[in-house]
Amino acid sequence: MLGEFEEILQKTIKWVENYDDFKDLRGKIEHIFKAAKMIFGMNEMHVYYRKHCFWKAFIILYMSSLLCQFIELNEININRAIPLLAQNRHFS
């Protein structure tokens, strides 16, 4: 167990050295989770069975990634689009 912990620490230190290389990718991932929570209600998901939870989470994250790709392809400001879409979600 200690060997595995040491391996995790070594990988973490290696990735920290390349922190700036992953900045854009991390930003895109954050937008996907932000859309999943704010627009598709992932933070309000109530599921009693694990297999249903994984399936619902997969669908929500897939839809969020498609939405983020659509926003990026159409050169829409994603920082403004997600909160606006989330705000409109509550009116329907």
Image (spheres, rainbow, N blue to C red):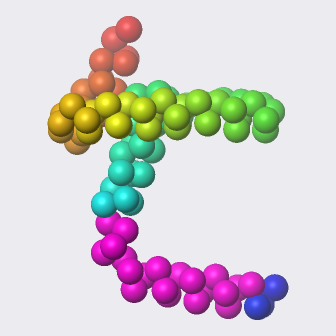
The residue under the point 23% across, 42% down is 79
- Point out the residue furthest to the top here: 92
Q: Please give left or right for residue 23 compared with residue 66 in the image.
A: left
Rendered location of residue 57, percent (x, y): 61, 36
The quarter of the picture where residue 49 lies is top right
- The quadrant of the picture occupied by the C terminus is top left
Rendered location of residue 8, percent (x, y): 64, 82
Asked whether residue 73 appears in the rendered view, the answer is yes
Q: Is residue 80 magenta?
A: no
From the viewer's perspective, is residue 19 above or below residue 51? below
From the viewer's perspective, is residue 61 above or below residue 19? above
Q: Main secondary structure of the magenta part?
A: helix
The residue under the point 45% across, 44% down is 33
Q: Nearer the viewer, residue 14 or 80?
A: 14
The residue under the point 35% across, 37% down is 68
Q: How many marks?
A: 0
Q: Please give left or right for residue 3 compared with residue 72 in the image.
A: right
Rendered location of residue 44, percent (x, y): 55, 31
The residue under the point 30% across, 18% down is 88
Q: Is residue 21 magenta?
A: yes
Asked whether residue 38 appears in the rendered view, the answer is no
The boundaries of the magenta stretch are 4-23
- The quadrant of the picture occupied by the N terminus is bottom right
- Point out the residue furthest to the front here: 73
